[in-house]
Image: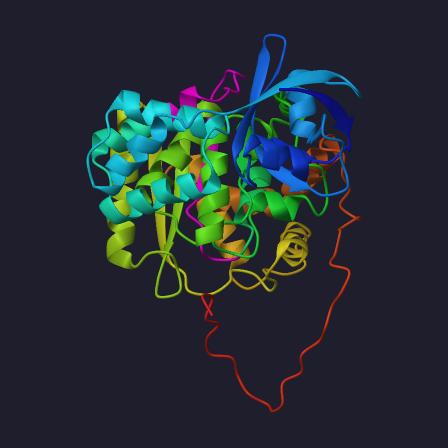
Amino acid sequence: MKLRIKMLKFSAGRPVAIINDALALKASIHVDNRVLIKKGAKAVVAVVDVAKNFLEKDEVAVSSEIVRQLGLEEKDFVDMDIAVKPESVRLIHRKLDCHRLTKSELFEIMKDISRNALTEAEIAYFVSAVYKCGMSFDEIRNMTLAILETGKKLEIGGMVVDKHSIGGIPGRVTPLLVSICSAAGLKMPKTSSRSITTPAGTADAMETICKVDFTIPELKEIIKKTNACLVWGGSLNLAPADDKIIQVERLINLDPEAQLLASILSKKLAVGAKYVLIDIPFGKNAKVNEKEAKILSNNFKKLAKSFKIHLDCFLEKAEEPLGDGIGPALEIKDVIKVLKRESPCYKLEKKSIALSGKLLEMTKKAKKGQGMKIANQILDSGEALEKFIQIIEAQGGSLNNIKEARLSHDIHAEKTGKIIEINKKR
């Protein structure tokens, strides 16, 4: 059917098309169905929403994601048809029955996820199938490749290093580590996720002081100026399938190990990292216990070796928030306190120095056993603070302009006491 575009200038984080309820009834299109919208040779799969008394029968309102991909203007005409259910739905059913998927089958699923051809419910079934049945090493490696090759790559050359935490414990180590290591001369294009199982991801925290969504050409300019960045990976289209899977994982609060491995390694490969450090906190309030952490570490190393990446893991018992604050603005305030040498913010400074030191030793920027000493010197000298400010300003932000929550409420203790534990999960 041919429909006229109505511009509403809204972003939905994915391609969304809104149609008149009468048109939806006539065409048997339901909310959350997928449709194919075409203009000339360009096409995009979009999810449908339905509105009453808002659009004419021959109109369609589209999100900015569709406008951008198809190059649309007000009152342009597009063709819209119901999208055929993809083959990957059958493949997801196979995985739910615990069959192993081949390389081509995993590519098919990741391709359909990246182009928005699968519903959130179908992606949730895939995540649940991986959680329920697990994956063989070959499946994990092939899924890593599929995520990588259905997205873009950041090609900046040189010795690129990266760090990633499996998450689960609040505290912003990454901005401190990137500042220290890039001040030491390492190239660190850090693309981070938003929160999955904690109140904030690094991208959420950084967004309180600067912009985090950039195009690849813009990102290359930032790295050229500063040797580093601290951005949201979802805006770069480096691993779009993984970004969509993460959105669903957040909804259903599942993060299967196989998906975790493929997610992290694919993004390190996408930025061209040669040296990677994985932070694996363990404990009763963390994502994994000590035994699971050791297994995960071995799996990371095995997978990285197959891609010829130098990878090491940092395992540490961690059952409480690392800093004084929990949540984006409060966690970034902790980072600034550590950089300004005002406070160690509980365990945040210690862990940041330990991880930075390990990465400096891995890359031969420090002799064995000297990494933490050099990392501490970079912090004490103010070089790390200077580098952080340089990165923030390159990303259009300011250290003195933290976006805090509009509402706040103080809760006072009813009696004197000593806190002996903070249960992160509760």
Does residue 1 lie above or below 356 as drawn? above
In this view, the residue in front, 235 or 390, is 235
The secondary structure that most of the magenta stretch takes on is: loop
Residue 364 visible in image: no
In this view, the residue in front, 66 or 325, is 66
Asked if the stretch drawn in magenta spans residue 154, the answer is: yes
In this view, the residue in front, 314 or 384, is 314
Horizontally, residue 259 falls left or right of residue 246, namely left
Horizontally, residue 257 falls left or right of residue 412, namely left
Extreme-top residue of the structure: 41
Q: Residue at x 71, y 33 (%)?
A: 395
- Residue 147 point in image, percent of width and height: 40, 27
Q: Residue at x 23, y 45 (%)?
A: 133
- Residue 269 point in image, percent of width and height: 42, 25
The quarter of the picture where residue 22 lies is: top right
The residue segment tinted magenta is 146-170
In this view, the residue in front, 61 or 150, is 61
Q: Residue at x 30, y 40 (%)?
A: 258
Does residue 394 lie above or below 371 as drawn? above
Does residue 240 lie above or below 324 as drawn? above
